[in-house]
Image (cartoon, helix red, strand yellow):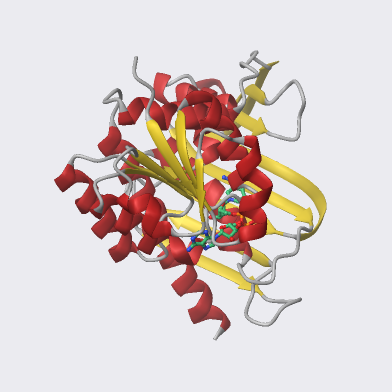
Amino acid sequence: MTAVRLAQIGVGQWGKNLLRNFAELADLRWICDADETRLAQFAPRYPNARATTSVEDVLAADDVDAIVIATPVPTHYELARRALEAGKHAFVEKPPAMRGAEMEELCELAEERGLVLMPGHLLLYHPGVQKLKELVESGELGDVLCVYGNRQNLGTIRTHENALWSLGVHDLSVVLYLLDEEPSELVAHGNAFLTPGVEDVVFCFLRFPSGRIAHMHLSWLDPHKMRKITVVGREKMAVFDDMELEHKITIYDKAPEQSTRTHGEWQTRTGAKVSPNIPNTEPLRLECEHFLALVRGEGDARRTTRDGLVVVRALEQLQASLEAVTA
Ligand SMILES: NC(=O)c1ccc[n+]([C@@H]2O[C@H](COP(=O)([O-])OP(=O)(O)OC[C@H]3O[C@@H](n4cnc5c(N)ncnc54)[C@H](O)[C@@H]3O)[C@@H](O)[C@H]2O)c1
């Protein structure tokens, strides 16, 4: 199997993790960062790759099949568009664009040119989230009624990006992936307590055409450190708790029941609580492998790109709702 020839633009706090994985899994040809000091820090670790501060060098390089973009969010759309226009597959950190229309343009460009455009929704590659998806799809939980996410902590306090864009993008990608449906109603409320214009606490509500609902509590101003997704089904309920070291998934055999014995009055059933084993594989590794597989023509590239599109559309609508309410 020929290794995918790869370039990476942006080797900052998060980019260095992508670089470590891609350097092991692919044929890393170029490292690019506008910051010379950063570049000088990484270039010696990857002597087979060429280092540059210019994006132009990477876009023009004949020896590059795919580009990994790990720069700040406002730069994603422009860089992704230019990568696709240059005929390169693109992995773009989340979210690849800040507006639905821009993301649609990127999707169309990728599809027209037969290129992969993969958004970096890391949580989708978490074995815990994969298990939730399996539980939903297999029908084990019964009809899914509602899903909610808790992503709270005290810190890290951001000053450029609000809690919706910084934290919510993760939960949103999971909620939309699990329900496999685009929401028809999206409402967000929040407040900027610390930095003017940057909401620290955000509550989001989503309603879907099927009648299912979802909620997300996003905050860096909270006493609890929570990284949790709860799925309530008609037959069973499941929780993915990423703060748990071993029992990341718990399935509760709990449900409401309406029995003829009680003349139709609601009662509840509480059965066993089960914590299935899930693989310990690093989600980032799986994410990088998925991108390279798509580039090699394996898997559903269109689906991966379209999953990213619904996330950007939802983010845009939630942001508009947040602004309308806080204005
Ligand atoms: N998936 C995750 O869990 C996760 C976690 C953290 C960050 N991220 C995402 O990763 C991306 C990068 O975040 P970060 O924390 O590494 O940011 P960062 O600021 O630490 O690094 C960004 C790097 O990009 C470089 N850069 C900026 N514009 C450039 C350009 N035009 N050309 C070349 N280089 C350029 C900067 O010099 C910097 O080194 C963001 O999109 C962020 O949302 C994802």
Residue 209 vertical placement versus 73 (above, below): above
**Image quarter (top left, top right, bottom left or bottom right) of the N terminus:** top left
Q: Is residue 177 left or right of residue 14?
A: left
Quarter of the rendered image showing ligand 1: bottom right
Front in this rendered view, residue 267 or 12 = 12
Q: Quadrant of residue 156?
A: bottom right
Q: Nearer the viewer, residue 227 or 43?
A: 43
Residue furthest right in the image: 223
**Can residue 235 be seen here?**
no
144 lies above or below 278: below
State the quadrant of the C terminus.
bottom right
Residue positioned most to the bottom: 327
Vertical order, 6 against 106 (above or below)? above
Residue 121's spot in the image, x, y percent? 49, 42
Tell me where residue 3 appears, x and y as whole percent.
39, 23
Q: Is residue 243 left or right of residue 148?
A: right
- Residue 155, given in percent of the width and then of the height, sits at 79, 58
Which residue is pictured at 61% across the width and 59% down the height? 36
Residue at 49% x, 22% y is 135
Callout count: 0
Q: Position of residue 41 (x, y in %)?
A: 68, 48
